[in-house]
Image: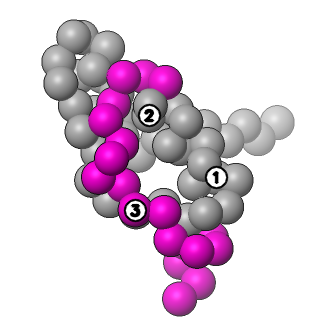
Amino acid sequence: MLSEQPGGKGANQAAAAARLGGSARMVGAVGSDAQGRRMLDALAGGGVDTTGVAVLPGPPGRR
């Protein structure tokens, strides 16, 4: 069974720092699709500041 989970090197490190009580901010971009929203929700839910993440129209990688 395939299971998709939000993450990636930078996102995982930011979430880990926030869980340990540190201040973490993510800077980057996600698409406006469901996966992008899931990533932002996961980061924010983990205590990561996502104000530096741009939401670009449509899914990423198709520009």
Where 31 falls versus 42 (above or below)? below
Mark 2, other Cα within 10 Å: few <14 / some 14–19 / many ≥20: many
Using the rendered image of the protein, determine whether residue 42 is visible from the camera's viewpoint.
yes
**In this picture, residue 60 sits left or right of residue 3:** left
Position in image of residue 45 (x %, y %): 49, 24
Under mark 1, the amino acid is Gln
Tags 1 and 2 touching, CB below 8 Å: no
Kindly state the secondary structure of the residue where label 1 is placed: helix
Under mark 3, the amino acid is Ala
Residue 19: name its quadrant. Answer: top left
- Residue situated in front as seen by the camera: 17 or 25: 25
Q: How far separated are the C-alphas under marks 3 and 1?
A: 14 Å
Mark 3, other Cα within 10 Å: few <14 / some 14–19 / many ≥20: few
Position in image of residue 32 (x %, y %): 61, 63
Q: Residue at x 31, y 35 (%)?
A: 49
Position in image of residue 34 (x %, y %): 70, 53
Residue 55 magenta-drawn?
yes
- Residue situated in front as seen by the camera: 9 or 46: 46
Q: Which residues are magenta?
A: 45-63
Position in image of residue 60 (x %, y %): 55, 72
Kindly state the secondary structure of the residue where label 2 is placed: helix
Residue at mark 1:
35
Residue 29 magenta-drawn?
no
- Mark toward the start of the polypeptide (2 vs 3): 2
Using the rendered image of the protein, determine whether residue 10 is visible from the camera's viewpoint.
no
Residue at mark 3:
54
